[in-house]
Amino acid sequence: MPSIQPLLNQDIIGTLEAFADTIVPGAKRNAEDRAVAGVVQGPGAVAAGALELLQTPATGLSDSLEEFADALNGHARLYAAAEPADADSAVPPFVALSYTERTRLVTVLTAPGHPERDLWVSLALFSNMAFDTGAHLHTADAIAAGHPGLAALGFAPPSDDGQWRFPDFSYGRPLARLHPDTTPSGSLA
């Protein structure tokens, strides 16, 4: 999978990874991992490439990731100030929150009526998209590399020629008769 572009500093990367991990949790990458909370076994959005997808210009968000991380950390500071716990200044404020606290904050940010809802829902959707589809990768390449989301979903690999063919109907029967002008390749003549 592609590596993270160096245009973001570690605090921004950690904050965005912590957000993605809140949406699709995964296992910690190592004992020192603070961004990934490690509340489940197996890979989540971070391992599936959420940050790589967010950095793709096609998302329309890539030029604003620093501002999004700053805003998320601002919300985390306000959230933490309301909680009777000592702040951990070794990591960004959102990363310092527990998984439960992250989830509560993201629930507030994505709730109907929140003025920034569209932004946070967009980030959440891209986190899901990275895991569910590997949208930043060609599907055949993602499957060949063992993309964790596609593997978890049981996404079928392509045939030897790189094409996907499904000889069996997904519902166990054809849903409609083929049009009489359908060619062997499936196109209309």
Image (tube, rainbow, N blue to C red):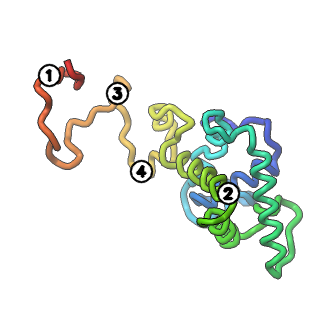
Say what amino acid the circle numbered 1 marks: Asp
Return the disc, 2 or 3, that comes first in the chain's sequence: 2
The residue pinned by badge 3 equals 163
The residue where tag 1 is placed is 181
Work out whether 90 lies above or below 64.
below
Q: CA distance from mark 2 to mark 3?
A: 35 Å
User: Label 3: few (<14), some or many (≥20) within 10 Å?
Assistant: few
The circle drawn on residue 132 is: none
Q: Earlier in the sequence, mark 1 or mark 3?
A: 3
> Could you say which disc has been placed on residue 19 in the image?
2
Helix, strand or loop status at disc 4: helix
Q: Residues within 10 Å of mark 1 (few under 14, many from 20)?
A: few
As rendered, which of 58 and 171 lies closer to the eye? Answer: 58
Nearest to viewer (mark 1 / mark 2)? 1
- Nearer the observer: mark 4 or 1; the answer is 1
Q: For marks 1 and 3, give the one nearer the viewer.
A: 1
Name the residue located 80 percent from the left edge and 72 percent from the top edge: 80
Residue under circle 4? 153
